Image: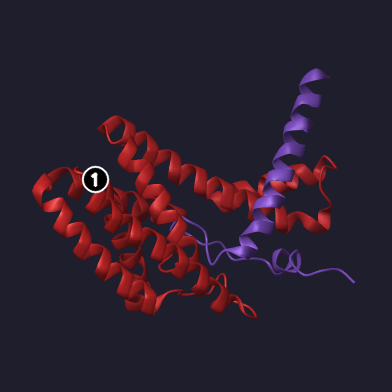
Amino acid sequence: MILKGFALTLGKLLAVVASVVAYLSNFTGCVICVNQPVMPQRVRMMKKPVH
Amino acid sequence: MLDKVANYTADLLSANHIIKEDDKEIYAYGIEVILSTVINLALIVVIGICLGYFTETAIFILSFASLRVYAGGYHARTHPGCIATFTLIYLANIGIVSITPDWLKGPISIGAAILAYVYIWINAPIEHKNRPFEGDEYNRFKGICRIILVIEFIAVMALNIIATNHHLPYCIALAMLSVVFVLALARIIK
């Protein structure tokens, strides 16, 4: 039970970091390294304000 | 392979109701970028420590990464190709730093910085098909790239004048040349 709670917390942390990285990638031309994954359209839409 | 790990992790997060099913591709993309960046940077930091070039490695990462993310340039098709190319660029930098005599580092760093300045000013940014520019992104990235370029150029020139040891500006100038290399490679492959 404790381990599952720990894993869920880690998962939430990873999800937060991943979403921040995806959002911030909208503000750079490419990633640092030499492989650029295909940027999904939904990642681009994160930048656009919701009306 | 990293894309499969990223997709699997996103599936796992979705199955445990941490993220929404609809948002999986956003998280998978973020995880893939994190994994790719961490693996590449960790690898060259470990190599740098093992070879006794930690400071040079840190300067390379800072100078190269800050310009690269706005200048764009060549991207490998696969992650193993990416890791191999990035490591080779880094090893070439460290190799050149280690074999260059101290008295040559000053003049070469000035020459390399001028060459990199002109080339990057004219050619950057270069977009990649996997991350095409939208709206005013081209002009925005060009502006930011030029600001970073000017800062690095001034740093090389100022350190050559101020410092008695030209090792530091030499490392920055070589990192700038590495950006020239990835930009030129992108043009050639195009």
Residue A23: name its quadrant.
Answer: bottom right
Q: Colour of chain A?
A: purple
Can residue B183 be seen here?
yes
Dot 1: few (<14), some (14–19), or many (≥20) neighbours within 10 Å?
few
- Give the letter of the chain under mark 1: B
User: Which is more toward the observer, A14 or B141?
Assistant: B141
With A39 as the anchor, is A1 left or right in this view? Answer: right
The location of residue B169, given as percent across then percent down, is 27, 51
Point out the residue furthest to the right here: A51
Name the residue located 76 percent from the left edge and 21 percent from the top edge.
A3
Q: Secondary structure at mark 1?
A: loop
User: Which is more toward the observer, B39 or B138?
Assistant: B138
**Mark 1 is on which residue type?**
Ala
Residue B130: name its quadrant.
Answer: bottom right
User: Which is more toward the observer, A5 or B61?
Assistant: B61
For the C terminus of chain A, which image quadrant? bottom right
The location of residue B133, given as percent across then percent down, is 58, 76
Figure check: B158 above or below B121: above
Name the residue located 49 percent from the left edge and 74 percent from the top edge.
B142
The residue beneath circle 1 is B163
The location of residue B14, given as percent across then percent down, is 80, 46
How is this picture coloured?
Answer: by chain
Name the residue located 34 percent from the left edge and 49 percent from the top edge.
B87
Can residue B184 be seen here?
no
Residue B190: name its quadrant.
Answer: bottom left
Name the residue located 25 percent from the left edge and 48 percent from the top edge.
B162
Chain in red, by letter, is: B
Figure check: B182 above or below B36: below
Q: Tell me how many marks there are.
A: 1
For the N terminus of chain A, which image quadrant? top right
